[in-house]
Image: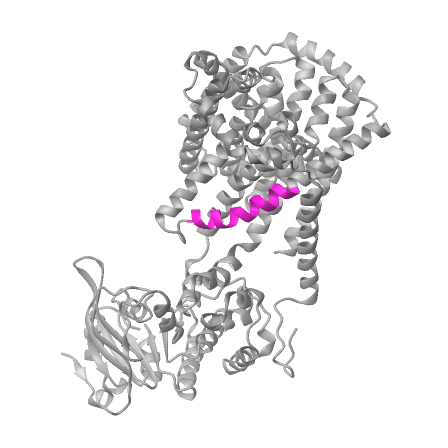
Amino acid sequence: MTTRGDPKIWLRFTPAERIGRSMVYIIAAIAVVWSARTIEIIPEFLYDAPQQTADLFQRMWPFDIKYWPFVWKTLVETFHIATLGTILAIMMALPLAFLAARNFTSNAMLRWTAQFIFVSSRSVNSLIWALLFVAIFGPGAVAGVLSIAVRSIGFVGKLFGEALEEAQAGPIEALTATGASKPAILIKGYWPQTEPAFWSIALLRWDINIRESAVLGLVGAGGIGVALDAALNNLYWDQVGLILATILAVVVITEIVTSSIRSRII
Amino acid sequence: MMAMDEAVRQPGAAPVVLRLDRLRKEYRPGLPVLKDITLDFDKSGVTAIIGPSGTGKSTLIRCVNRLVDPTSGSIWFEGADIAQVRGSALRAVRRRIGMVFQEYNLVERLTVMENILTGRLGYVPLWRAYLRRFAEQDIARAFELLESVGLGADFANRRADKLSGGQRQRVGIARAIMQSPALVLADEPTSSLDPKTSVEIMELLADISAKQSIPVIVNIHNVELAKRYARRIVGMTGGNVVYDGKPDGLTAQHLSEIYGGEEWQ
Amino acid sequence: MTASAAPNAPSNMAAAAFPPNWPKRFAWAALTIYAVYAISVLDIDFERIVRGMDNARRLFARMFPPNLQADKLALIRDGMIESIQIAILATFVGVALSMPIGLAAARNLSPVGLAWAARGLIAILRSFHPVIVAILFVKAVGFGVLAGILALVVSTIGFVSKLFAEVVEEISAKQVEAVRATGAGFGHVLMFGVFPQVMARFVGLAVYQLDSNLRNSTMVGIVGGGGIGAPLFTAYQRFDYDVVLTILLIIIGIIMLMEVVSSRVRQIFQ
């Protein structure tokens, strides 16, 4: 750093800061170089990539309209999977979020358990959860709903738990001082403060789940992915094109809907 | 209507550093905020522009370094009309004009030193700026300035968001002076500060203006401060200049003309 | 879309005087009715759940103990390393591209036309799940890690540049103006006026995306995009559930480790 005696020396960071940052940069650089060098990329595949891509789009157009009734049916199923999955996830995540929030639960063991459930839920992708649930419940929408639900618990629980921890202590202490019961404190103290966060989290996750549930069918967990899987296996690219266009439209609509709701409630 | 003080405008008394000629600004067509302002600023001392809020003081100052583009008229600075210059010519002009802001406008997450050295950015290649490799003499000068605005070298590595308002404004002044400007503009530099700190900041501006012989044009709401530290006062109202002269010449009558019925204290 | 649309009433009303809020109650009722309807449409019934529990018991019985044979572990290790490499490269390339795209999409810095073009690009990149993008890339560049990397680059750009643009739009214009007033050029203004305000958040986004890419890189293999996904899917199809469990445990372990690392990195760049 600087002293009055030697004013010309000026460094942006303290030595400790410099070391910390440099370490991160160096490790990042090593990681990238290591990855790039050991990964095998077959150049021959790259040469005809533009051709293949052009070919892909040519085969997609015109869409196979005859496939539409089936696409529509699976699309509706996708919507149900995403929505039910989100509702189910919220029902399971809310109690856990209260367990995980430091200002609500004082027992460290309980908090730690809730955190562990969140991390496990988030670490495993919804597609992998779907694999497990298909093995248990057989192919179909049930597996889809459960995999969406289980995958979303961690997301909803973690974010809502954080929102709870940010809740101001003042109103809650005031309620506690009146001798209110724990459920009363919860409904009149925490809920009003965290409700906007709750809806924003729920909407955000629902939006994500619409996208996620579109692929679950690839492993047999229902929804539009089933139609996609069938089309891909048969190499019917004109059907694939139709499905992708449908998903694109749904995603755009979902985005518009969620953002308009969000602007109204938050 | 316009009270002219001949001593200020006498030709040859002091060379003119900035000349505004029929400067006009309309944010919406037909509604001028500045109504053909013509003013000369000579090379010394503090000039205070007073007037009620919303009267175009800030627009006037921002037109000079072209943070706001004037609608018509000319701005003569260092031998050229800069009212329409763009690109690198505009940046060259801005380097020669320091600016002090009402809310300090320091880059909050940078250190005091980095904020002061921001004044040299116009002269430093991008990669040097990125690596914070400023020239030694720049750093030495930044430390001197830190001293002369009353902060001292200990402040160099503090982050701007850790400073008080008065300290921030001192850094803001150091940043402006760091540009080695031919002119300093100060836009309500004391409006966000408490009365005591306001006095200190005005004193600092006047002091630096005198010592480094840099002319300072300052927008200020507080008439008492303006009278105390400015050598010349320009009173504006409704986009017009209605007083231009020495502080002593400013009478209660002028003030009521400038501020209308509005409270001016 | 009706269901989640629930409350457009002010949310602090409970704090006010607890008046009954009919639109809100109606929304809750609609949500419940929808849930019941959807459950019936999807053929979710009690009997099926019970049968499922039976399957679950058998599944878990076959999962335990996790398979720790040396040859299996070697296979898993290779797949996992490949997944990590896919995640690292995709994050690096994607984050590097997200910086300019995010800046271009920020409406406070970028010209209107460019901003909308960048926003359109981001919207398109965001619409598809990485696995679907991977399917397309597998067709375009063939089976293997490259398809996986490209798919994750796309999702990285979609996520990071969108949020980065939002961060940039939130910066203080005054700080930028002050740097501009010193006569600094555009690059200098970015570096001294904009980046200091957004860098910590950008690093946070990048690190978060590394997490997310690591999760997704375990999946792209299911459609031929390389990484641990392929061995996982094979083991699953062969009913080698003990291997599946081993892989899942390793994935969870690595991702938890990543969370620790990423929170450290975020602190350093605070």
Q: Which residue reaches farthest left?
A: B1
Q: Nearer the viewer, residue A35 or B181?
A: A35
Question: Residue A36: x, y in percent?
Answer: 67, 44
Classify the position of the C terminus of chain A by image quarter: top left
* Picture layout, residue C75 above or below residue B186: above
Farthest residue toward the right?
Answer: C70
Q: Report the residue that reaches farthest toward the top.
A: C47
In the foreground, C16 or B175: B175
Residue C160 is inside the magenta segment: no
Is residue C222 shown to the viewer in this render? yes
Asked if the stretch drawn in magenta spans residue C100, the answer is yes
Instruction: Compare residues A178 and B233 and report the one nearer the observer.
Output: B233
Q: In the rendered image, which quarter is residue B248 located in?
A: bottom left
Q: Which residue occupies 43% across, 43% down? A: C118
Q: Position of residue A168 (x, y in %)?
A: 56, 46
Q: Position of residue C155 (x, y in %)?
A: 55, 37
**Residue extent of the magenta highlight:** C88-106
Look at the picture and state if A215 lies above or below B170. Answer: above
- Image quarter of residue A226: top right
In the image, is C193 to the left or to the right of C93?
Answer: left
Majority SS type along the magenta span: helix
Q: In the rendered view of the protein, which quadrant contains the N terminus of chain A?
A: bottom right
